[in-house]
Image (cartoon, rainbow, N blue to C red):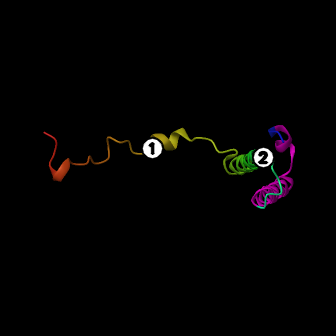
Amino acid sequence: MNTEQLSSMSEADLRHTLEESRQELFNLRFQIATRKIKNHKRIPAVKKDIARIMTVLRERELMAVYAGVEFDEAAAAAAPSAQTTARRRGLFGRGNK
């Protein structure tokens, strides 16, 4: 499954596909443990699919949180700078000489 297909899916479909992929991974691991399957190449592919699905879901979550939020330069200018805060004194409370 490629990212273009995943990005066109709805969130419910992605969650359903994620659950199916996790179940498939569990079944593959179980089959390998019981020596019913000898082809181990499917496991990395399923793990990559799971990672892709989780990435798309996380991107959508972050877009929902940060969509439309702009950096306010006026608020950044009003914040105290590092020079106006008190300087820490040196080791053992001695000042810099």
Q: Residues within 10 Å of mark 1 (few under 14, many from 20)?
A: few
The image position of residue 85, as x and y in percent, is 32, 47
Instruction: Tell me the SS state at disc 1.
Output: helix
Q: Is the N terminus in the top left, top right, bottom left or bottom right quadrant?
A: top right
Q: In the picture shown, does residue 77 fall above or below 86?
A: above
Q: Marks 1 and 2: CB-CB under 8 Å?
A: no
- Outermost residue to the left: 97
Q: Identify which residue is drawn at 83% across, 38% down.
A: 4
Image coordinates for residue 78, horizontal then vertical, percent: 45, 43
Q: Read off the residue under disc 2.
A: 49
| In magenta stretch: residue 49 | no
Task: Give left or right: position of 78 versus 41.
Answer: left
Q: Which amino acid type is marked by label 1?
A: Ala
Q: Looking at the image, which residue is at 65% across and 45% down?
A: 69
In three-dimensional space, the C-alpha distance between marks 1 and 2, rounded to whole angstroms, equals 46 Å
**Of callouts 1 and 2, the N-terminal one:** 2
Residue at x-position 53% and y-position 38%: 73
For label 2, the crowd category at 10 Å Cα-Cα, with few meaning under 14, some 14 to 19 and many 20 or more, is: many
Pick the front one: 83 or 17: 17
Boundaries of the magenta span: 4-33
Queried whether the magenta region covers residue 31, the answer comes back as yes
Q: How many marks?
A: 2
- Mark 2: which amino acid? Asp
Asked where in the image residue 13 lies, by quadrant, the reply is bottom right
* Residue bearing mark 1: 78
Quarter occupied by residue 30: bottom right
